[in-house]
Amino acid sequence: MIPFLKLLRLKNLATITIAMLGVAYFIHVQNPYEVIDFNNYHFGLLIFSTLLIAAAGHMINDYFDIKADRINKPEHLVLSKFLSKRWAILLNWILNILGLSIAFYLSWQYKNLLFVAIHLLSINFLWFYSAYWKRKLILGSVVLSILPSLVLFLSCWYIQACNESAAEHSPYHPATWSTYLDYRFIYFVAICAFFITLSKEIIKDIHDIPGDTIIKANTIPRKIGSHKAQLLSLLILQLPALLYFLLLLFTDFALPTTYTKGVLIFVGLSFLLSLLLHFLVPNFLAKNMKWAQNIALLLGLTCLFF
């Protein structure tokens, strides 16, 4: 049972759940005087279907990664050691079909094909990433980095589907009433998550060079070298702060709470310090950089709650 749970990546699934719940919580808390249409049961189904597809993606990724994982992380190998490859394919199909079926139900309920479209896109992204794209220069890392952001966008789009009607407004028919909410901060968090995840994937590829060499994956570190790849990863980490300053200069965007401002300052300075350490003690940074990225992602999610 425990090897099977490792295959599902429970930490990743827990992060997805927290992120989606965080979006719902943030929207309700930041709009206390708005009447927000929200169905707890349907949103729970949306979370569950997203978790099913994410779990299926983890399985198919391990299926195509067996040869590299035997080199990079043999102690974490599950497929072929505790579970046959055939079972991984079967479970991948079952989970994807269940997740997509829920998406069809939600699309039917809200007369909106968005849920089916996003889940179909995610299933195909995860399959083609695992089978082909992860071996392509840049493409694999970018595709995988889009998916965490898509979770936040999907949560916003569900709330929009509940509250924004395309029908002509009538004071006598509640179905035509619309509530327009501000999702800009959540979109900002989603874009920052994309940059941090992209940076994290480059660092992961640095550690995975031995296995990626065996399967001839054309990753960024294999193309430009570990040192330059680490520098590129650190430069990408400066983009959230740059994005925030651009929003301040050209829009009326504002952070919702003092806690969020503190998190942004702390994370921004940490990333700036990491860039300095790259030139002073690169070996120390290479070993500990993954922790800094994980903490930054976690702190970003806490901003949805505080």
Image (cartoon, rainbow, N blue to C red):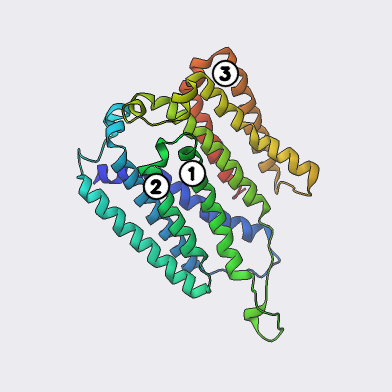
Let me know if residue 8 appears in the view.
no
Question: Sequence-wise, which precedes: disc 3 or disc 1?
Answer: 1
Q: Are marks 3 and 1 in contact (CB under 8 Å)?
A: no
Q: Residue 47 falls in which quadrant of the image? A: bottom left
Q: What amino acid type should be assigned to the residue bearing mark 2?
A: Phe
In the displayed structure, does residue 36 sit left or right of residue 229?
right
Q: Are marks 2 and 1 in contact (CB under 8 Å)?
A: yes
Residue in the picture at 34% in, 62% down: 97
Per the model, the C-alpha gap separating discs 2 and 3 is: 33 Å
Per the model, the C-alpha gap separating discs 3 and 1 is: 26 Å
Residue in the picture at 48% in, 62% down: 117
Q: Are marks 2 and 3 in contact (CB under 8 Å)?
A: no
Q: Residue 143 has which mark? A: 1
Q: Nearer the viewer, mark 2 or mark 3?
A: 2
Judge by depth and name the residue closer to the eye, 145 or 83.
145
Q: Residue 278 has which mark? A: 3
As helix, strand or loop, the secondary structure at mark 3 comes to: helix
Q: What amino acid type should be assigned to the residue bearing mark 1?
A: Val
In the displayed structure, does residue 49 sit left or right of residue 28?
left
